[in-house]
Image (cartoon, grey):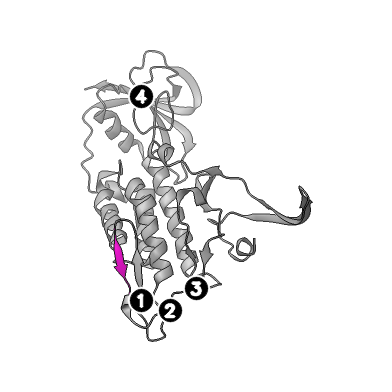
Amino acid sequence: MILLQRLRHANVLQLYGYCYQDSNDIPDTLTTITELGSPLEMIQLLQTSWEDRFRICLSLVRLLHYLAHSPLGSVTLLDFRPRQFVIVDGELKVTDLDDASIEESSCTSNSDCFMEFPARNFTLPCSVEGRCQSMNEKRNLYNAYRFFFTYLLPHSAPSSLKPLLDKIVNATGELHWGIDETAAQLERVLNLYKSGEYLQNTTRMPKAEYRRVPEAFIPDENYKCWPSYHHKGCLLSVFDVNEAIEICDSYSQCKAFVLTNQTTWTGRQLVFFKMASTHIMPDPDKITYVKVTD
């Protein structure tokens, strides 16, 4: 409870209050009241869009950056597993700080700074002050790699971002980077994605022509794609109309798409992709593009 009070950050579960009360004949039981989050289900996360999975990783890195530079010093999460986290409005938040520690291990030589994991071991340098350098930070970072990055970051990412994402995954898996560089690189990915710069090196010559139909919507004619924001149709996010055209060109069954007025957390527009345009209905909030030539 004290750690939740002291560690105030967007990716730490918010503490609303606490009280002492007797409970089941146990005197002075402490009850804390926190914001409500959904349990982190890795299987479900793997089925979501890359954009949402990237948000989870970005949330985690922002949290670890804060913990490395917190008012209490460098904080490590000794019990670092997905069940220690929840999702609140799409953001990852740590909920259990029972096993958090601010003690950097003491040492007399580098051999004292040994970190053991199931698949890898690392030896960190021992500082002249007799402390293992950045051990708390590096322990958090490697756990982020093995529990989150390796599963969530590269898969189904935009092709032009994959080299940078692979570099991030490899650098954290080998602990070549600290949290500052890792956070900077993930923020760079976010900027490339939000600004549309990641599309500049891709070929964007449309294969087909499309007819623009303003204030129109196709209610049916859905087909499924993965990953999709809609379980019964193909609903994806795009940076602009050109990217929507490129996506529609890449699906043989796509004959039209509908721009909605909904956006994702990065500000990208949600688009329904359709396999026909037989029934077009009026809708003032949507714009439909119909493929006229293949």
Q: Amino acid at mark 2?
A: Ser
Residue 121 within the magenta-colored segment of the rendering: yes
Q: Quadrant of residue 98?
A: bottom right
Residue depicted at x 49% and y 67%: 75
Magenta span: helix, strand or loop, mainly? strand
Q: Nearer the viewer, residue 87 or 140?
A: 140
Q: Is residue 218 above or below residue 116?
A: above
Residue 38 within the magenta-colored segment of the rendering: no
- Residue placed under numbered mark 2 in the picture: 106
Q: Earlier in the sequence, mark 1 or mark 4?
A: 1
Residue 157 horizontal side relative to residue 59, left or right: left
Q: Nearer the viewer, residue 26 or 42?
A: 26
- Residue placed under numbered mark 4 in the picture: 224
Q: Locate residue 31, reporting x and y percent.
A: 71, 53
Q: Is residue 63 above or below residue 160?
A: below
Q: Dot 4: within a 10 Å radius of its alpha carbon, few (fewer than 14), some, or many (20 or more) residues? A: some
Q: Amino acid at mark 4?
A: Lys
Q: Is residue 218 above or below residue 287?
A: above
Q: Are marks 2 and 4 in contact (CB under 8 Å)?
A: no
As measured in the structure, the alpha-carbon distance from the residue carrying label 1 to the one carrying label 4 is 54 Å
Q: Residue furthest top?
A: 278
Residue 55 seen from this side: yes
Q: What's drawn in magenta, residue-wise?
A: 120-124
Q: Amino acid at mark 3?
A: Glu
Q: Are marks 2 and 1 in contact (CB under 8 Å)?
A: yes
- Residue placed under numbered mark 3 in the picture: 103
Q: Nearer the viewer, residue 280 or 104?
A: 104
- Residue placed under numbered mark 1 in the picture: 112
